[in-house]
Image (cartoon, helix red, strand yellow):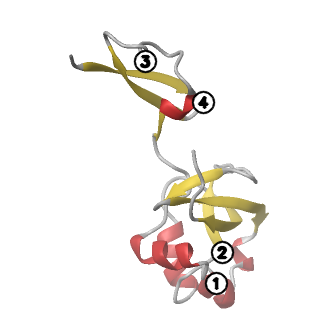
Amino acid sequence: MGGRLRFQRRGRTLWARITRVNGAAFGFSAPASEWLSLKESSPMTFTKKLRDPIMRGDITCSVRIWQSPRVKVGGRYRLGEGAVVVTSLRQIELTDITPQLARDSGFAGVVDLLKTARHGAGDKVYLVGFEYRPDTRF
């Protein structure tokens, strides 16, 4: 017999679980391992060209322009088969973005970085430090 897809919202995450009508897995009382986390839109998304270098550990920081912080230190954000884990977060000035920081973030220069970072209504600049963990379970 077919199942149903059930949803439950917890914070910014939508949790889904396929339930069986005639089985023990019916309802929301199943173990957490049977739930599937569906992030609506992860605040730590990366352009395709940056994903592989991040997963190799070549890139460990990102400059973000937001209205307010969208991540927290210790937060885990899915990328590939693992997750980016935020290790530091601090607000910086636009003038703090140097060519070296842009290169460390995976961009050719400051202008290249700002073309990607400047989207939306944000006006505060944040430097996010992170590390990639290949097998982090959600």
Residue identified by numbered label 3: 25
For residue 49, which quarter of the picture?
bottom left
Q: Secondary structure at mark 4?
A: loop
- What's the distance in space between the residues labelled 2 and 4, CA to CA? 27 Å
* Precedes in sequence: disc 1 or disc 2: 2
Q: Which residue corresponds to the image point at 54% horizontal and 15% vertical from the top-left? A: 29
Disc 1 crowd, CA 10 A, few/some/many (<14, 14-19, 20+): some
Question: Quick check: 129 above or below 69?
Answer: below
Whether tag 2 and tag 3 are in contact, CB under 8 A, the answer is no
* Precedes in sequence: disc 1 or disc 3: 3
Q: Secondary structure at mark 3?
A: loop
Whether tag 1 and tag 2 are in contact, CB under 8 A, the answer is yes
Q: Which residue corresponds to the image point at 45% horizontal and 40% vertical from the top-left? A: 40
Disc 2 crowd, CA 10 A, few/some/many (<14, 14-19, 20+): many
Residue identified by numbered label 4: 11
Whether tag 2 and tag 4 are in contact, CB under 8 A, the answer is no
